Amino acid sequence: MALPPFQYVAPATVDETLALLSEYGERIKVLAGGTEITGRLKQRLVTPSHILSLKNVPGFSGIATKEGEVVIKAGTTLREVIASPLLKPAFSAIIQAAEAVAAPPIQNIATIGGNLLQNTRCLEYNQSELVRKASGLCFKTGGGTCLAVKGGNRCFSVYQGDLAPALMAFDATIKVEKKGSSRILTVCDLFSGKGESPHTLSADELVTEIHLPVPASPFASSYKKLRMRGSLDYPLASACVFLSVGDGVAREARIVLSACGPSPLSRTEAAGLLKGKALTQIDVQEVADAAARGVEAADNLVLPASYRRKMFRVLAARAIREALDDLTKAGS
Amino acid sequence: MNDTSIIGKSTRRVDTTAKATGEAHFSADLYLPRMLVGKVLRSPHPHARIVRVDTTKAEKLPGVKAVVTGRDSTGEKWGVFRYTQDMQFLPADKVRYIGEEVAAVAAVDADTALEALALIEVEYEELPAYFTVHEAMKRGAVLIHDAFADNINIHVKIDVGDVEKGFKESYLVREDTFNAPEESYFQAEPYAVVAQFDNSGNLDIWSPNAGPHLKAKPLSNCLRMPLNKVRVRKITIGGAFGGRSEISPADVICSMLARKASRPVKIAYSREENTIATRQAHSMTAKIKTGVDREGRVVARDITCHMDGGAYSSTGPIAVSVPFLCMEQAYRMDNVRYNGFRIFTNKPIRGMYRTHGRAFACGIDLQLDMLGEELGIDPVTMRLRNARQVGDYTPTRSFVPSCGMTETIVKAAEASGWKEKWGKLPPFHGIGIGCNSVQTGFPMGIRGGSEAFIKFNEDGGVTVISGVVDNGQGNENMLVQITAEELGVLPEDVQLITADTEVTPSDPGSYSMCETFVGGNAVRLAAEDAKKKLFALAAKTLECDPEELVARERKIFVKGEPERSLPLAKVVRMGLSKGLSISGKGAYWPKVDPRREWVDNPTGQLSETFSFGTTIVEVKVDPDTGLVEVVHAWASQDVGYALNPRVVESQFEGGLAMGGQGGMLTEFHIFDKGRVLNATQLDYKVPLACDMPPITNIIVETHDPKGPYGAKEAGMSVAMSAAQGYAAAICNALGVWIHEFPLTPDVIVKALEEKKVKG
Amino acid sequence: MMEKPEKIRCALRINNEDYDLFISPHRTLLEVLRDELQLTGAKESCNEGACGTCTVLLDGLPVRSCLLLALEAQGREVTTIEGLAKDGKLHPVQEAFVEHHGIQCGFCSPGMILTAKALLDENPHPTEAEIRRAISGNVCRCTGYAKIVEAIKAASGKEI
């Protein structure tokens, strides 16, 4: 299926970019790596009049340290993320997440910003025009019903990005710019929790940087992704854990579950069960069960919700165990 | 086969260099002068009357050169059998599934064509639609086709011996029901057609097909053209797997557009169109009742199968029968009954698929394991005790002239270390076996035979003219190897003209595994014919008996005395100088029972011979996630003779990936009211390189008396036995019998939970 | 009817040759290679980046040309399957695929071969696991990948 026609603009600076976003708003879409937007265009899920390419904007990719943070430009490809000596081996969950995205050829061109900002997905939504004509509208396409959850009163589409849960586990923030101003928000606050419009950004905003605070060592992290095949597939469920220690006792802990509903979920209560505990005293399954309790899933991916719901505790436990093993090996 | 120089060797294929460089052209790679882009308008309704189609706005759009609808159709209804003629290409009365063709346009570019489609107005009157076989068969259901009561398309009935008596005499009887949803082919190449008329009204048409001659006749019927003006052309084909044997609506629609526009037209299907608007594989429920004696030998078996055929007949009678036939060939049984039903629903059309009936095949074998468990007999022994033997007759009266079933079981068991592993593996680590058999063709009436011609150039080069088609499995190479061997030339001396209905004589196509047996034999006979003439000439000059001559490496010489030789090219010229044309002609018609018919008379010789095979699989299951790691697979098949061992191995490996790894672990379609929700590779999971196990290939050769050099078939059997082996291995690993396939992670986790609850 | 955007200039460098094209902005690199230049080695099989038959090398790295606007490939080096053989001689990876029966229907082969070549350029002696991972995004329906992996193993170490 060919793409719908559009005008193409390729500004040469960030300011030009922001000016265009401000002028065109909803009618313009940003093109970074293109691995997501191209598919959505082909299915006519989105039909902008303009496509804005970032290819000519200098300095939009790269990883550097600055004032105790690792700063990743939003246009950095996942391949560059995986290879970065500033991220490996310490930020292992982020590397694991980047390596888990689709397959290597996608990683060669997909960007971390694009991966973060991917739209939510659902078997009923991500369809051709023919199938959507046959099914009728749903909440996400402007209608008043959910096709996946019969009788559902909201959109259950799933956020399936791999990087977001890992970035959240590391307490990352993002820099968002628009014409005349910029702001910083946590990755967590980027998500609205609403399937119809999963991100809290306005149409004229551009994500330019991701900031990773460098934790007080020692720390470990782990990202676990569930999919039927060993490559290519989006997650059916995922879990990310961050754990730091001090004096043999867990200090900072974060557990993020994703590929459940419209946004990744930070499980603070469950993570709290880890804090202050001696590593050898941690009841992994208890924490994992707490993290997974009440996490929703709908029958809108290839495997049933009843199965996926059971997997969050399994993945959470595996992520916690791997983080603990890494910390133990490092001699904490 | 002892003294061959090319046959039996893993020579490089003749077609793969062009594929490696990208020079090989598939149908969508063709660009003809002034070619137009064709696009099809499809029904968004699963069942609806077509009230009105208005194409005026579309026709007026600049750049649109032709528009066709049901009004342009000849009204000819097509079906693969006379009693299944239910499909009009471009329907005028009603649509029967989401995605069915309603209209089509040809325009100067894709954008214009898409814009034109959006301008076609269609008014539908929706009808009740049925998405399961139960809904469709219910009393009072609207008929999808008026001629078929209760929406039952086909009922195959086979009853041999006395099944009830057999059950009474059995030591142990079990009844189980197995089911599987639909799957589909996912050939790498999506369907595409290029059609062009010349100013004499000849049609040239290119499309991926499994039988050009099988396409030409229906095309000539539908377009009301004489057959000799319909020229299905040779093109590189990106896979078929049973799915491209029949004419496709796209073929007719593209031809109609090309005729109307007086310009070539290309229709290239999207992946979604290839999935929903060509063919899929049947979903099915198989209820199997089997009675065995104390030693585990099957005494009686009764199977009832319900298959969801989708909206049209397609190859219905064949697809309903083949799962049963494969089983009755593979295993001995005196008393067997089969009731196979194919039911219409308002879903995409189902046809024959390489893994014919996974629920049926896996059900049969799992049940043998279940019965064996109760009797204290291991699965390998159960197979050995029931295995088909040479000289047998199948229940429906096919004689089995060669059979290596036992040998494949024994060899696979040995290679896999079955004895050391069975019953001794740790929890969630399992091993399983599957056995099956495939026919080499079936009665195809006037299209069942293959004819071939061979011509010589004066420099000793050779051209083979044959209707054999290559879908990627290596059939072209097979013809070259056979010809080179017979005539004593080198493979590079052989040119092929194949699969072109203007030039090549009729051939059944790669339909039901018969190309090697039928097409290969025809070429071999043509080569023998030519060789006879060459030897007669050479014998005079060499002063010997033609019987003493041998041809090898471009020379004809006396056996055992290579100095007494003549270059082949010289013999050719000798003939020409005497006014003798040197050419060869051969034809092969398999000796099948012409009275055998799928529904009316399902008895008699089905095909001349059969392949037999066993796959053993070892797996480890992650009990928490239900994910399966396949440790190793051993694929064994009696192929009669391996004309090219690496080509044969390639078929085993591909079959295992399709039937086992995909068919048992990840492949199934998700429907919502007739809409296919996973029509593309993103959500329909075909196996990837990182998930495949190491595969050990065990070729068994029983040297069939009739096959060319003893060869039978190699392309389908492993797909089926692999599915069975995977299912058995996983059930063994879990200690639970599962009756639904594929064994996706959720199915496995659920089965383990239920097991925990039970005990 | 949306106003049709004008065609704009697109300068591409493909297989070391420069092309000065005039195309609609919404054309993908795959469409331009096939429809404008008849470089039909790159194929469309899924059109959504999930199969790899459209693979080309972009500055030596395998990418999905069906997900890349042609305009985005400007200023980069594009290598298609047609650019591998030199002076009628197959590239060692192509040769290995033919010799080791790593090709059946051939539809996935251009994408598979380019991906393999890129792997060996970066990692001349990959382990089997590394090979399988590198081609994990290339779908083959015919071979079960067994002889593809053998071919790549055979080609490793034979790079020029």
Image (cartoon, coloured by chain):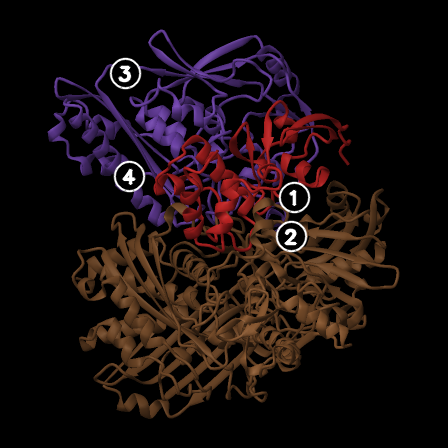
Chain colours: A purple, B brown, C red
Q: Secondary structure at mark 3?
A: loop
On screen, residue A53 above or below B212: above
* Residue that badge 3 annotates: A215
Q: Secondary structure at mark 4?
A: helix
* Residue that badge 2 annotates: B26
Residue at image position (54%, 21%) is A202
Residue at image position (47%, 49%) is A150
Q: Is residue B40 left or right of residue A109?
A: right
Q: Nearer the viewer, mark 4 or mark 2?
A: 2
- What amino acid is found at the position of numbered circle 1 in the picture? Thr
**Residue B406: which disc?**
none
Asked if disc 2 and disc 1 are in contact, CB closer than 8 Å, the reply is yes
* Residue that badge 1 annotates: C40
Q: CA distance from mark 4 to mark 2?
A: 44 Å
Q: Position of residue B299 (x, y in %)?
A: 31, 86
Query: Which of the two labelled residues, at mark 4 and mark 3, occupies the earlier sequence position?
Result: 3
